[in-house]
């Protein structure tokens, strides 16, 4: 397959080599022992270890591998299958998970496409996250995916090269996503719905707080328009303190709560809560 990679230093086309990647100006990016490539330039790092840390990634992996978000992942896979069904069969398809974490959703998407009647050979998969540890973990799920350490601020892809970008609970950069998507490309964003994590939220905030409305459509204005939105909504029952603490470590609450609130969550050994996620599909505005 022809390369769609772009050098983060000089923006020239970059191709895979036996040991990693190299651009036309001979900037090289070595593949790590685990198989991923680090495109994050040291001078652009704002901290030594940007992104989710080791403990957060381990919690996420344990939680996801228990199947608690399988229905959400199935919803994302159906959304992407819907996008693909409208396309000419057999043409090459490139899919990026932007902010892929430890690779759960991309691995499951690849599996579901592999089990469908689509030709798996025409697909190429890319997973990008700013956390090196997350990407190292992702390589353990599937070494045939192209896993990269990079930021959504500066993605290592040439203009108009991807068919689908998806993003699950991760930071969004509409202008960079627009740059790298093909004109007919689609962007699918999974983001919290109004009831998401109700149950846990009541333990954390004894006085009920309203969820903030998503302003993604406003943020996307001029670059993308909303094509459709589906909702994945179900009840989850967690049956141990370990599972509850793993979930907490996956949420922004983990950073925002004080010690006594954390202790309150730690004493729980059962928790019923809502999973409520919106999957918003955006089409690139072609101007
Ligand atoms: C809430 S986690 C979601 C991870 C994964 N999509 C999932 O749902 O399991 C957010 C992820 O975004 C990553 N992240 C944060 N800032 C980023 C950036 N500027 N570029 C790429 N990834 C980033 C973090 O390292 C983390 O893995
Ligand atoms: Zn270069």
Image (tube, rainbow, N blue to C red):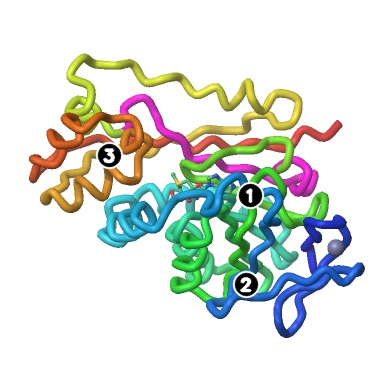
Q: Are marks 3 and 2 in contact (CB under 8 Å)?
A: no
**Could you tell me which secondary element the residue under label 1 belongs to?**
loop
Quarter of the image where one finds residue 186? top right
Q: Is residue 192 magenta?
A: yes
Magenta span main SS: strand
**Could you tell me which secondary element the residue under label 3 belongs to?**
strand
Q: Which residue is disc 3 drawn over?
A: 234
Closer to the camera in the image, 127 or 193: 127
Q: Quadrant of the C terminus?
A: top right
Q: Earlier in the sequence, mark 1 or mark 2?
A: 1
Does 256 appear above or below 66? above
Closer to the camera in the image, 146 or 280: 146
Residue 213 placement, left or right of 18 = left
User: In front: mark 1 or mark 3?
Assistant: 1
Label 2 neighbourhood size at 10 Å, few (<14), some (14-19), many (20+)?
some
The x, y position of residue 94, in whole percent, is 68, 61
Q: Which residue is disc 2 drawn over?
A: 119
What is the spatial separation of the Cα atoms under label 3 and label 2, in whole angstroms?
32 Å
Q: Earlier in the sequence, mark 1 or mark 3?
A: 1
Label 3 neighbourhood size at 10 Å, few (<14), some (14-19), many (20+)?
some
Q: Which residues are magenta?
A: 177-196
Q: Earlier in the sequence, mark 3 or mark 2?
A: 2
User: Which residue reaches farthest right?
Assistant: 25
- Answer with the quadrant where ligand 2 appears in the image: bottom right
């Amino acid at each position: 397959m022809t390369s769609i990679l772009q050098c983060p230093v000089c923006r020239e086309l970059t191709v895979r080599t036996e040991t990693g990647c190299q651009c036309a100006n001979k900037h090289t990016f070595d593949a790590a022992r685990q198989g991923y490539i680090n495109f994050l330039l040291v001078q652009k790092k704002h901290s030594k270890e940007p992104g989710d840390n080791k403990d957060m990634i381990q919690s996420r992996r344990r939680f996801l591998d228990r199947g608690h978000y399988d229905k959400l992942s199935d919803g994302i896979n159906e959304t992407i299958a819907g996008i693909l069904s409208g396309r000419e069969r057999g043409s090459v398809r490139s899919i990026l998970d932007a902010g892929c974490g430890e690779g759960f959703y991309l691995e499951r998407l690849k599996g579901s496409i592999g089990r469908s009647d689509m030709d798996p050979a025409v697909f190429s998969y890319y997973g990008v996250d700013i956390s090196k540890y997350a990407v190292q973990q992702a390589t353990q799920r599937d070494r045939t995916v192209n896993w990269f350490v990079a930021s959504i601020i500066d993605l290592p892809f040439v203009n108009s090269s991807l068919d689908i970008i998806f993003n699950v609970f991760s930071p969004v950069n509409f202008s960079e996503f627009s740059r790298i998507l093909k004109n007919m490309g689609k962007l699918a964003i999974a983001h919290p719905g109004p009831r998401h994590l109700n149950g846990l939220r009541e333990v954390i905030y004894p006085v009920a707080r309203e969820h903030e409305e998503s302003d993604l459509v406003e943020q996307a204005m001029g670059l993308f328009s909303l094509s459709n939105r589906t909702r994945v909504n179900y009840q989850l029952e967690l049956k141990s303190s370990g599972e509850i603490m793993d979930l907490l470590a996956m949420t922004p609450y983990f950073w925002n709560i004080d010690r006594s609130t954390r202790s309150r969550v730690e004493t729980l050994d059962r928790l019923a809560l809502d999973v409520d996620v919106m999957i918003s599909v955006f089409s690139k505005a072609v101007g």
